[in-house]
Image: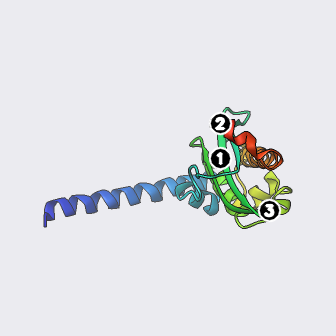
Amino acid sequence: MDLKKDKTDEIKDETTEAKKILAKNELVKSGYSEIVIDHWLNPRNLGKIQNYNGYSGKISSSCGDSMWVWLKIENGTVKNATFLSDICIGAVSAGSMMTEMIKGKEISKILTISDHDILRELGGLPAQYEHCAGLAQKTLKFAIADYNAYKAAPWKKLYEQK
Ligand code: FES
């Protein structure tokens, strides 16, 4: 065993942890909730899924940040939901929370999810970033519309390139 390497790794781990704590303290001071910080540092449902049947791609907010959402819906229930977004804390935490909120739910129940619902679950966002929750809600809305279009004409997927 290489003890010197182990010690270096240990110091690196401690440094990374210390940086995370410092960053977290700064974020709390800036008005981000513990929930937001947790979802930003450990985003749930990040990435693309295969065999999705609802998708919205590169939906942009007024600030220029974008989000993508993939849904897998079976028998009217969201079996899986994932997202990608720009690095913005608000967008990552809102996308992460939104996908958690809709997994396992019936489509009819998620149609009414608003940006305020996402904000409430996050414990709020600083005022200048509240629109990030709107981006998550808007991207979800487009993904549901895509699913409804898919349901109406499933054969069209054969001709799409995404
Ligand atoms: Fe615009 Fe987060 S989506 S700053």
Residue 110 x, y percent position in the rendering: 81, 59
Q: Secondary structure at mark 3?
A: loop
Amino acid type, residue under disc 3 in the picture = Gly
Q: Identify the mark at residue 65; answer none if there is no mark.
A: 2
Query: Label 1 near label 2: C-beta < 8 Å?
Result: yes
Amino acid type, residue under disc 1 in the picture = Ala
Tell which of 102 and 3 is nearer to you. 102
Establish whether ligand 1 lies closer than 8 Å to the Cβ of label 3: no
Q: CA distance from mark 2 to mark 1?
A: 8 Å
Amino acid type, residue under disc 2 in the picture = Asp
Looking at the image, is mark 1 or mark 3 nearer the viewer?
A: 3
**Residue picked out by circle 3:** 76
Q: CA distance from mark 2 to mark 3?
A: 30 Å
Establish whether ligand 1 lies closer than 8 Å to the Cβ of label 2: yes
Q: Residue at x 62, y 37 (%)?
A: 162
Query: Label 3 near label 1: C-beta < 8 Å?
Result: no
